[in-house]
């Protein structure tokens, strides 16, 4: 909320400076986001009078003026404005001034050979909304000693305060002043609330069906008509207040209504009485009824929205926005004022459904003073009669006030101490609450029962009162107290989280960079990665490209890869760790990565190599190894989800658990992402991995000689060598390691595989004969599965 | 000059003159070999009288020792020279660049998540987790935001298509606070928890992304209140930003799930175009916190007469941006290599 200091002073008698008020506001929870200080804004500007104006010797369009200020100092100014004439009082920007319109720093400069010691400004250059042409013309009666801001009618400091949604009462100067007064910033000024004398009875036929549903929506409405007003331009004080508050002046009636809302917190609606056809109905909207708002926008109403209507059509979406049909203009002479209580839930709902925001809705949905229906109406009437003339009718009330019982909240001394951490002098506690409008109803040794004022809808429980006391006394006075940290224990989930970070470090050490991408992706991509499971769709995505929860981490990684390639990267290595989503909201943690292009950089020392399936298989196995998955329990199955290349991909399984996928990306997916070239990727299902390291025993590290045996076998080209290796491990407990050290294709149907096996008895020296036996076992096994030992 | 003197002079000369190991080896044979020159002199001894043998013999033996000594010396010298020559011939251009190694970068959020976890776990806070896809009840109602609560509209929520149960519609959590409820229900009071995770709001402009990360903290005990909250947050910020004299300001604010509520600012000033913390008079908001609302304790099945709680939240990206000077929120999720090269961390960074 924006307002000027002088407006605040209507409600607060204070000696404090702008800065001190701002500090108080922030300290009580009314955060000052910004103070606009005109002295700061118009630093290096001054009022001057043009002493004489001569034509510039070098340019017909320019004049050379001598100007004089309040102290008689003279300056030479080159000026192009047509209205620069002798005797004119205007605003001069001196070197060092910042021109509001452009933000530029003004310097002395030569214009066509003559030095100009400043610049005379137009309204536009000072960012003042005025239609004057040329340099500003200050009224001749204004003394040169006046400040520029005063002369321009914006001499007031402006506060821009952010109001939290619980403080409906502070969407008004009155409410803000009341909080400030409670802190001791000044004295709260109670406004004159004497009712206006009615001149005639209220005669409009109001149709208000006192049904439960209407009462629930709008329990109480006060009306009054005023006849014979003049709705012209607003008086200067009013436009000035509104301008500083950031509102445009429309007409005096509308301006007064807006002013009163800001001033007192009471929203009202004003109808042009002569535009109402027939009776005035308060009813729910009809099915498929439309309503044209004050800006001319048409809305489709729903049957649970309350409208004010005449015999023909809706005039106002009550509490949210007025209509075009009965808008006041300069011809308006007679008006109807409505001042109502609305149920905040319904107002919030209606506004949200139609996506309509207004100052009225903001106040109603945050809670207004429940007793302000009539008093608010009287206040506005008084303003209108004073400023627009006319005669007021009697007040007509429909419905009834549902708020006969005051809310009462008990505050225990012990609760205040338990939350605030120190005992407080009870008299000062009561003093704070009383200044905020609470009344002590009764008290005993443990505390007091307080009545909550009608404007504080947010005070309902003991804790609410505790907050009031603490915030007005100041949070800075609460002492800090350390917590006991002796009770530390084992945090399994944190360990798990750290393990993931270690896996990330591992992958980074393998040349992959970590990225973080959105959890949602496009329908197109999600569909391509939907793998036997249903995708989850958002009802209201921010864009179609982010409409489906990602079923895999790969789409975003591939998108990133595409982008990097298009920017000229020759090779890409990326990974992400995050959740994937499918079916009815299952979510699993995955790590996925993509590699494309060269594995290493170009160099004299090594041959470059394209990333291939075995790089990503290595990535998967590295992660599994970090998680202490026993590699003897693992096997590679030659299949993977549909987005992988059907014969160049695999799944790492342990028993029945699928731990990871790897392989080349299916060419159709490459096409979808516009990637040319071979891209390999992997996914690790982190939730399937063991959560804890298994502690192994260590026997003191006695080492016995091991025996290595190398074999060269011929296999059919279709044999899965990974399975052969897995099987060899199972042949004998002496076999501790079996690696493929050589591989080449003999021809289309046969491949040669070199396998090296390490034998170790671990607790004793291995005998040559034992090694011989194991070697025979291996050869027999291989021959049993169709392989043969190569003859040298 | 006797024969022996001549032999000595010629042998010593030849040893001195020899310039490689092979020749020196041959020279050794020529002197000491079976038919070598010294052997000749030894043989001649046989023909002499005992008296002459004794005198001449000792001369020959002296000569023998001298020659052995000189030869060994020469061997050592030539060996060193030979090695020097060999090594000189093995010269490499060590100014060449080494073999390239390629390491990836870690995302800054990963590093900051660790930094935050380290500090909070040192306070005895345990890590807790909750789902990204939440139920309306846990995201709003249980946190004291009943239907049509104005704060509910402030959270521009993503809803899941066609999914609802008795706990309301399914949605993407708009904050990490639902974890408070899950943690209380699972572990009861007293407890200390923190959580870090993704949250979602339907907001997209220069300063908002539809997804970001929050840090959540909750402590429930019989005697915990605002003073403890003040200590935890002040200590955390000073440790995290590594500024001992960081000034911290608590100012009243509003959150539906805490009462009283506060926002926390820390002081800073702009130095050479960068933010410096713990100096200056400007304030920067970094945290929302408060004393847990009794309705929230009730949702968590915690006896709100016996127990009281404090809770706090930070934006992970905000803390990261402030600590490491990262200017734009969007860069976090754009997977840009250039961005990672500047703001990413090496895999061994702590």
Image (cartoon, helix red, strand yellow):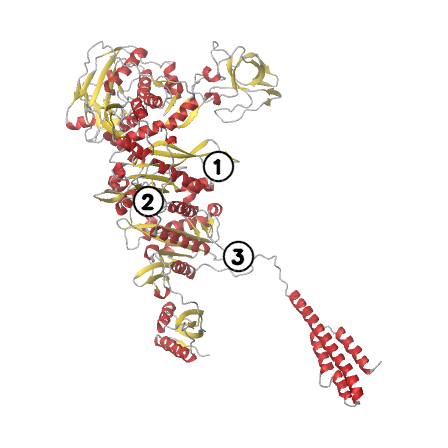
Q: Quadrant of residue A690?
A: bottom left
Please give the residue where the numbered disc 1 appears in the rendered image: B275
Residue under the point 54% across and 18% down: A80
Q: Nearer the viewer, residue A663 or B57?
A: B57
Taking depth in this image into account, of A734 and A360 the one nearest to the observer is A734
What x and y, as percent, mark residue B192?
Answer: 32, 44
Tell me, yes or no, whether the two marked residues, 1 and 2, touch with CB atoms within 8 Å. no
Give the class, few, some or many, for how many residues have Cα within 10 Å of label 3's Cα (few <14, many ≥20): few
Which sits earlier in the primary sequence, circle 1 or circle 2?
2
Q: Nearer the viewer, mark 1 or mark 2?
A: 2
Residue B192, label in figure = 2
Looking at the image, the residue that sits furthest to the front is A445
Query: What chain letter is assigned to the residue under label 2?
Result: B
Tell me where residue A173 appears, x and y as whole percent.
34, 21
In the rendered image, the vertical position of residue A60 relative to residue A758, given as above or below: above
The residue to which callout 3 is attached is B100
Task: Determine if marks 1 and 2 fall on one subunit.
Answer: yes
């Amino acid at each position: 909320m924006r307002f000027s200091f002088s407006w605040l002073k209507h409600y607060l008698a204070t000696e404090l400076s702008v800065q001190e008020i701002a500090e108080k506001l922030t300290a009580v929870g009314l955060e000052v986001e910004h103070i606009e200080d005109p002295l700061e804004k118009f630093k290096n500007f001054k009022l001057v009078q043009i002493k004489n104006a001569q034509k510039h010797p070098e340019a017909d369009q320019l004049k050379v003026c001598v100007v004089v200020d309040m102290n008689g100092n003279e300056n030479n100014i080159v000026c192009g404005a047509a209205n620069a004439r002798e005797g004119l009082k205007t605003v001069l920007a001196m070197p060092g001034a910042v021109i509001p319109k452009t933000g530029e720093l003004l310097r002395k400069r030569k214009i066509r050979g003559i030095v100009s010691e400043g610049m005379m400004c137009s309204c536009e250059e000072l960012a003042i909304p005025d239609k004057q042409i040329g340099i500003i013309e200050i009224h001749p009666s204004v003394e040169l000693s006046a400040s520029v801001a005063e002369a321009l009618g914006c001499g007031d400091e402006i506060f821009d305060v952010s109001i939290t949604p619980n403080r409906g009462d502070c969407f008004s100067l009155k409410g803000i002043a009341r909080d400030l007064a409670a802190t001791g910033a000044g004295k709260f000024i109670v406004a004159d609330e004497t009712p206006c004398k009615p001149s005639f009875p209220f005669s409009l036929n109001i149709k208000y069906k006192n049904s439960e549903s209407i009462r629930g929506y709008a329990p109480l409405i006060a009306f009054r008509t005023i006849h014979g007003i003049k709705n012209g331009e607003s008086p200067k004080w009013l436009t000035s207040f509104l301008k500083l508050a950031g509102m445009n002046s429309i007409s005096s009636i509308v301006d007064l209504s807006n002013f009163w809302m800001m001033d007192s917190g009471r929203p009202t609606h004003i109808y042009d009485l002569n535009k109402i056809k027939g009776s005035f109905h308060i009813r729910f909207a009809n099915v498929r009824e439309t309503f044209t708002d004050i800006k001319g926008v048409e809305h489709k109403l729903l049957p649970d929205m309350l409208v004010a209507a005449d015999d023909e059509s809706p005039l106002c979406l009550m509490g949210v926005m007025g209509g075009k049909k009965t808008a006041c203009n300069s011809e308006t002479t007679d008006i109807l004022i409505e001042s109502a209580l609305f149920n905040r839930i319904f107002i919030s709902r209606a506004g949200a459904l139609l996506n309509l925001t207004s100052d009225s809705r903001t106040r109603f949905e945050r809670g207004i003073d429940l007793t302000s229906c009539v008093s608010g109406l009287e206040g506005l009437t008084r303003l209108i009669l004073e400023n627009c003339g006319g005669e007021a009718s009697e007040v007509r009330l429909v419905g009834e006030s549902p708020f006969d019982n005051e809310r009462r909240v008990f505050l225990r001394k012990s609760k205040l101490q338990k939350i605030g951490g120190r005992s407080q002098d009870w008299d000062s506690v009561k003093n704070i609450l009383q200044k905020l409008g609470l009344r002590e109803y009764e008290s005993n040794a443990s505390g007091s029962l307080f009545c909550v004022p009608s404007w504080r809808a947010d005070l309902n429980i003991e804790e609410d009162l505790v907050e009031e006391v603490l915030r007005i006394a100041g949070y800075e006075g609460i002492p800090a107290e350390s917590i006991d940290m002796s009770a530390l224990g084992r945090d399994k989930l944190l360990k798990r989280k750290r393990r993931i970070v270690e896996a990330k470090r591992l992958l980074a050490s393998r040349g992959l960079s970590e990225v973080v991408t959105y959890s949602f992706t496009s329908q197109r991509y999600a569909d391509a990665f939907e793998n036997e499971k249903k995708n989850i769709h958002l009802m209201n995505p921010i864009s179609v490209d982010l409409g489906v929860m990602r079923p895999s981490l790969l789409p975003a990684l591939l998108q990133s890869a595409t982008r990097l390639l298009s920017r000229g990267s020759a090779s890409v290595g990326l990974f992400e760790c995050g959740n994937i989503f499918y079916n009815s909201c299952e979510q699993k943690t995955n790590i996925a990565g993509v590699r494309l292009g060269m594995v290493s950089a170009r160099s004299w020392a090594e041959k470059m190599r394209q990333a291939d399936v075995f790089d990503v298989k290595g990535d998967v196995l590295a992660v599994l190894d970090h998680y202490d998955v026993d590699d003897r329990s693992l096997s590679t199955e030659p299949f993977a989800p549909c987005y992988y290349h059907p014969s160049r991909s695999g799944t790492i399984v342990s028993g029945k658990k699928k731990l990871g996928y790897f392989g080349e990306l299916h060419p159709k997916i490459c096409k979808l992402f516009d990637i040319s070239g071979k891209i390999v990727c992997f996914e690790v299902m982190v939730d399937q991995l063991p959560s804890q390291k298994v502690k192994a025993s260590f026997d003191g590290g006695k080492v016995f000689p091991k025996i290595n045996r190398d074999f060269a076998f011929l296999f059919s080209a279709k044999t899965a060598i990974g399975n052969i290796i897995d099987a060899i491990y199972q042949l004998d407990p002496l076999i501790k390691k079996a690696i493929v050290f050589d591989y080449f294709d003999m021809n289309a149907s046969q491949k040669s595989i070199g396998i090296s096996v390490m034998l170790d008895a671990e607790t004793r020296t291995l005998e040559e004969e034992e090694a011989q036996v194991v070697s025979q076992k291996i050869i027999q096994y291989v021959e049993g599965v169709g392989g043969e030992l190569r003859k040298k | 000059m006797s024969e022996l003197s001549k032999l000595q002079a010629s042998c010593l000369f030849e040893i001195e003159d020899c310039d490689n190991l092979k020749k020196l080896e041959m020279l050794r044979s020529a002197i000491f070999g079976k038919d070598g020159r010294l052997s000749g002199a030894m043989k001649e001894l046989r023909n002499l009288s005992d008296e002459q043998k004794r005198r001449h013999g000792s001369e020959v033996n002296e000569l023998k020792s001298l020659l052995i000594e000189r030869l060994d010396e020469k061997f050592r010298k030539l060996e060193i020279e030979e090695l020097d020559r060999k090594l000189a011939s093995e010269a490499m251009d060590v100014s060449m660049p080494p073999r390239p190694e390629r390491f990836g970068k870690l995302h800054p959020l990963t590093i900051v998540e660790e930094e935050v976890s380290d500090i909070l776990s040192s306070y005895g806070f345990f890590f807790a987790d909750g789902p990204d896809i939440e139920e309306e009840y846990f995201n709003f109602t249980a946190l004291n935001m009943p239907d049509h609560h104005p704060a509910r509209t402030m959270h521009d929520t993503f809803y899941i298509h066609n999914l609802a149960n008795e706990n309301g519609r399914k949605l993407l959590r708009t904050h990490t606070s639902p974890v408070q409820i899950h943690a209380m229900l699972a572990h009861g009071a007293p407890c200390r928890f923190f959580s870090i995770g993704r949250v979602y709001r339907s907001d997209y402009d220069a300063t908002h992304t539809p997804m970001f990360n929050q840090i959540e903290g909750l402590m429930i005990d019989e005697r915990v209140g605002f003073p403890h909250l003040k200590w935890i947050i002040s200590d955390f910020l000073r440790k995290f930003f590594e500024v001992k004299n960081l000034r911290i300001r608590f100012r009243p604010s509003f959150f539906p799930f805490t009462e009283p509520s506060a926002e926390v600012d820390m002081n800073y000033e702009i130095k050479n175009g960068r933010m410096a913390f713990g100096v200056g008079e400007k304030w920067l908001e970094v945290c929302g916190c408060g004393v847990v609302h009794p309705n929230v304790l009730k949702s968590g099945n915690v006896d709100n007469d016996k127990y009281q709680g404090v809770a706090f939240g930070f934006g992970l990206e905000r803390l990261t941006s402030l600590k490491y000077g990262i200017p734009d929120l969007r860069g976090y999720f754009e997977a840009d290599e250039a961005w990672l090269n500047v703001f990413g961390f090496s895999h061994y960074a702590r």
